Structure formats: structure tokens, C-alpha cells
């Protein structure tokens, strides 16, 4: 791994010049997400004229359950998806010892930015195209048993991790004080109930973070635009509703409820397992609770622990998604009813840093 920003940019420039046999003329740091991985847009005198340098960093210990393995490297999953026709960035080189990957520059137009000025029809068409990637992912198999993503699962440890994050960072927002042990236990019990339900579902390959900022729109060379998935290294096996939750209950883009339901109705029979409608809808809401509960906690954590308040403005969308899901599943179990009470107490306003 590379140390400070100056040495990182110098190392990136050397790798680009070596791998692409061209001269670097400018390096532009790009804003990252909640992880600590760094990204740079590197302009060169050669072809291509710009590339994205993806630089690994030491992991944030809050980013995964204690005792579990870190995310696998980008390869061979990227190549596996590319070879099967899934839209991912091309690899242009890199330096594995320094944790640097050089990737196709897809530009800065994401699904999130594209829908800001889109009409309702344009937005629905863009989301339909994004959703159509999900059955393609779920149909993939790993016959050679060489892709780490197929050995990773949304398991009980991950649900416990999400519960603990929510209890530590989100519960105080709902309660206006530190959570008591009984309240923490209530959250853990609800997430374990969700984990048990998820364990009965088919397990299919999921991107794991298929949200609007991880889908880039770029020209395919013929004037048409294509959606390209980024941030794919966290892929794992999960219930068929998981990526749909990431996309349709996205904190960065809040979709009208009728559009969400329309997209779900269209895609359900296209999924390889063709889930029965009632269990499909139930798991969608249950996974919304666990996924958006984790997202809410991470947004609060970033603001209060790191002083990074970039995501605080998305808390209101996240809370509304949580409240809706909680209301629909509260009747399934007393633990979910208790969680629903806590979720409904969450404020929609941004937390203080």
C-alpha cells in the first residue's frame, strides 16, 4: 500500500508511464465513497488520454465484521464478468504489489447524476436498463471454482455486523441518548430474524453495492450510451432481492413508490429463481431494513467519527426507506415490531458532526 497523497501521486504517475508508455501531464484526485480506497484521473500524452488509477488503502476496521476476510482483489472477478458480456471497466494495466489498478475512464456521468434532469419516462428507462443487469448477474456460475465472489455469502456474521453498527451509531439518533443493553439486544434480535429468513432464500451472485453512483453512463462508440458497473470487488452470494434493494432503495436517489413497485413486478419473473411474489416482497422489505440500517449507521459514523459530513444529507432518504419497510414487516414478529418503533423514532434531519 502507498502512504501519503504526494507519494501516492508520484507512484501512480510512474506506474501509468511504465504501463502505458506515455507521459503523465496531470493527476486529479477524485472524491471517494465511505471506504478509504483512493482514485485518481490521470491525463497522459498518449492513448488513452486519460485513465482511472484505483489505489488500495489499509482497510477501515469499521468496514467489515471482525474476523472476516477483507474484500478480494478486483481481479479475477472483473475479467470474469467482462468475458461474460457484463459491462465493467476495461483494465489497462497496474501494479499488484503497490495495489494500483489502471482502469478505463468512464467519465463522471453516473446514474445518480443522469436522473437529476431526466423526465419520469427517461428515469424509468434508465432504471429498467440498470435492473436488467441483475438477472444477468444472477444467472452466472463459476464452474472452474476460481472466483472468490462465489465463496462469499451474505451470512449471519454480516447481519450481526449490520445490527451492531445500527445499534452503535443509529440508535442514539433515535433515542436522543446512548442505547441501553435491552435496546441493543432488540436490534440484534430483529436482524437475526431477518438473517434466518434470508438463509431460506436462493443464493445468487450480487454486485453488493449496485446503487446509482456505482453505475456510469458512457458512450459505446456508436453514439448510444451504456451503463457500466464499478466497485464490483465486494460481490457475493445473496438472496435475489439484494441488488434490487441497493438500486431501488438507494439513499442517493429516492424513487417514487409506484416506480419501485413497477420495476419489481417486471423483473421478478425474469430472475432465474422466479421467486414467489409474497416472499419476494417480504424479503425485499426485510433486506431494506438491514441494508439501509447499515447505510444509515455508516453515514452517521462518517460524520461523527471521521468528520466527513458529505453523506449526512442522504440520511432523510434513508430514514424514509427504513420507515416504509419497517411498517410493512412489523407484523411478522415481535422483534421486528420493536425495531419498527426504533426506526420510526429516527430523525430525518442530518446528524450533528
Image (spheres, rainbow, N blue to C red):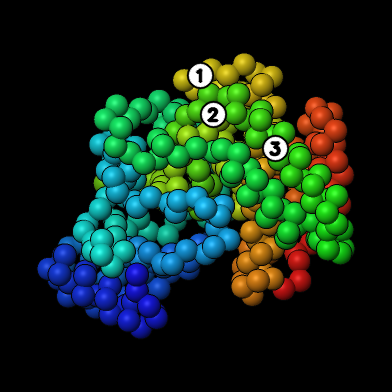
Relative side of 232 to 314, left or right: left
Real-space Cα separation, disc 1 to disc 2, in angstroms: 8 Å
The residue tagged 1 is: 273
Q: Quadrant of the C terminus?
A: bottom right
- Which residue is more in the foreground, 197 or 83? 197
Task: Identify the residue at image location x=29%, y=60%.
Answer: 101
User: Considering only order in the chain, which callout, 1 or 3, is on the residue closer to the N terminus?
Assistant: 3
Cα separation, mark 2 vs mark 3, equals 19 Å
Image x and y of residue 245, in percent: 60, 38
Q: Residue furthest bottom?
A: 6
Secondary structure category for the residue under label 1: loop
**Circle 3 or circle 1, nearest the eye:** 3
Residue at image position (66%, 30%) is: 196
Looking at the picture, tell me which residue is in the foreground, 85 or 272: 272
Answer yes or no: do the residues labelled 1 and 2 have beta carbons within 8 Å? yes
Residue 51 position, x and y percent, is 28, 63
Residue 263 visible in the current orientation: no
Q: Is residue 34 left or right of residue 84?
A: right
Side of 162 relative to 230 (left or right): right
Residue 192 is labelled as 3
The residue carrying mark 2 is 240
Question: Which of 21 and 62 lies nearest the eye of the viewer?
Answer: 62
Of the pair 116 and 321, the residue shown nearer to us: 321
Amino acid at each position: 500500500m502507498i502512504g501519503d497523497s504526494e507519494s501516492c501521486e508520484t507512484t501512480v504517475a510512474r506506474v501509468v508511464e511504465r504501463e502505458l508508455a506515455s507521459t503523465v501531464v496531470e493527476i486529479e484526485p477524485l472524491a471517494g465513497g465511505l471506504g478509504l480506497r483512493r482514485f485518481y484521473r490521470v491525463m497522459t500524452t498518449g492513448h488513452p488520454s486519460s485513465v482511472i488509477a484505483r489505489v488500495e488503502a489499509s482497510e477501515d476496521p469499521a468496514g467489515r465484521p471482525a474476523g472476516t476476510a477483507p474484500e478480494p482483489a478486483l481481479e479475477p472477478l472483473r475479467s470474469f464478468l467482462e468475458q461474460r458480456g457484463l459491462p465493467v471497466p476495461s483494465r489497462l494495466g497496474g501494479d499488484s504489489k503497490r495495489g494500483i489498478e489502471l482502469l478505463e475512464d468512464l467519465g463522471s456521468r453516473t446514474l445518480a447524476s443522469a436522473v437529476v434532469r431526466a423526465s419520469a419516462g427517461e428515469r424509468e428507462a434508465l432504471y429498467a436498463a440498470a435492473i436488467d443487469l441483475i438477472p444477468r448477474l444472477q444467472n452466472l456460475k463459476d464452474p472452474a471454482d476460481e472466483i472468490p465472489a462465489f465463496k462469499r455469502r451474505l451470512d449471519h456474521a454480516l447481519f450481526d455486523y449490520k445490527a451492531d453498527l445500527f445499534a452503535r451509531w443509529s440508535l442514539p439518533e433515535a433515542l436522543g441518548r446512548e442505547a441501553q443493553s435491552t435496546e441493543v439486544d432488540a436490534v440484534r434480535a430483529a436482524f437475526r430474524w431477518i438473517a434466518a429468513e434470508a438463509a431460506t432464500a436462493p443464493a445468487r451472485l450480487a454486485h453488493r453495492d449496485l446503487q446509482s453512483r456505482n453505475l456510469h453512463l458512457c458512450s459505446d462508440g456508436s453514439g448510444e450510451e451504456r451503463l457500466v458497473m464499478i466497485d464490483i470487488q465486494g460481490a457475493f452470494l445473496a438472496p435475489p432481492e439484494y441488488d434490487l434493494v441497493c438500486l431501488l432503495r438507494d439513499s442517493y436517489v429516492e424513487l417514487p413508490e409506484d416506480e419501485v413497485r413497477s420495476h419489481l413486478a417486471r423483473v421478478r419473473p425474469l430472475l432465474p429463481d422466479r421467486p414467489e411474489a409474497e416472499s419476494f416482497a417480504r424479503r425485499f422489505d426485510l433486506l431494506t431494513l438491514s441494508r439501509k440500517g447499515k447505510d444509515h449507521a455508516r453515514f452517521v459514523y462518517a460524520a461523527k467519527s471521521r468528520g466527513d459530513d458529505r453523506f449526512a444529507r442522504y440520511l432523510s432518504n434513508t430514514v424514509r426507506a427504513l420507515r416504509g419497510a419497517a411498517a410493512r414487516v412489523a407484523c411478522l414478529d415481535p422483534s421486528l415490531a420493536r425495531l419498527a418503533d426504533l426506526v420510526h423514532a429516527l430523525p430525518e434531519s442530518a446528524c450533528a458532526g
